[in-house]
Structure formats: C-alpha cells, structure tokens
Image (cartoon, helix red, strand yellow):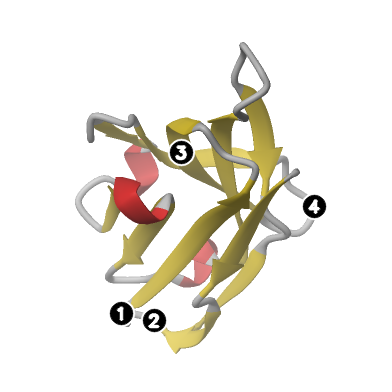
Amino acid sequence: QVQLVESGGGLVQAGGSLTVSCAASGNIFSVNDMGWYRQAPGQQRELVAAITSGGAANYADSVKGRFTISRDNAKNTVYLQLNDLKPENTAVYYCNAEVRSPSDYVYRNYWGQGTQVTVSS
C-alpha cells in the first residue's frame, strides 16, 4: 500500500504565504510525476502545479509567478510554496503522485486526503 500525507495547510491573510508538503510512504519502488490539485466549494478539482521526477514543473496560469512546486526525491516528498495568497485561493489542496510498487510493472495514481488552505481578506 502507498499513502500520501499532506501537511502545512491553515489560515492566512491575503498577501501572506504558506507551504504545504506531501510525503509518499509505503510500498514504493519509484515515484514519477507528483502534483498539487485544489478544490474549492462547489467547484471541480483543478490542477495547480505538477513536477516530474527530473524537476520539470508546470503551473496553472492563475498561480504562475506566485506558487512554486518542488520535490525531494530522496524523501518522496513534494512541496508547494504559496506566495501572495488571495481569497480566491481558498480550497482543499490535494497531493497526487504516480507511484510504482516493487511488485508492480506500472505506475498507479494516488491521492492524499487533502489539506485546507483558507485565505482571509
């Protein structure tokens, strides 16, 4: 089994910063792409940022220049630095990872339980 555990969410004022983290653990042989999604109330889940195992990142247009995704491959951990936060960034942020287990030949998609980020105006 593979688990993704997020941490670091919370309440922050507009203009503030926050870092959320996600650690993958369990039966892991390798981790491919990792990413962050978010879902606001009444909205669909959307991609915020993603990063390959080699470190190539891509971002949603709405967060470019304000959010930074990074990862530590040795720790199977992905981070999202959120700067200049706006009230519309309020959402549950979910971690996603493509993980291959030792006994498997394919990468499977896993989700974390989500961490709440609330930005007050």
- Residue 6 spot, x, y in % from top left: 58, 65
Marks 3 and 4, the one that precedes in the sequence: 3
Disc sitting over residue 33 in the figure:
none
For the residue carrying disc 4, how many other residues have a C-alpha within 10 Å: few (<14), some (14-19), or many (20+)? few
Marks 2 and 4, the one that precedes in the sequence: 2
- Decide if residue 102 is on the left or right side of residue 33: right
Q: Which amino acid does the dot numbered 4 rest on? A: Gly
Q: CA distance from mark 2 to mark 4?
A: 21 Å
- Decide if residue 107 is on the left or right side of residue 57: right
Q: Residue at x 65, y 42 (%)?
A: 27
Marks 4 and 1, the one that precedes in the sequence: 1
Per the image, label 2 sits on a secondary structure element best described as loop
Q: What residue is disc 2 on?
A: 14
- Residue 104 spot, x, y in % from top left: 66, 18
**Front residue of 2 and 4:** 2
Q: What residue is disc 3 on?
A: 34
Q: What residue is disc 4 on?
A: 42
Q: What residue is disc 1 on?
A: 15
Marks 1 and 3, the one that precedes in the sequence: 1
Per the image, label 3 sits on a secondary structure element best described as strand
Q: Which amino acid does the dot numbered 2 rest on? A: Ala
- Residue situated furthest top in the rendering: 105
Q: CA distance from mark 4 to mark 1?
A: 24 Å
Marks 3 and 2, the one that precedes in the sequence: 2
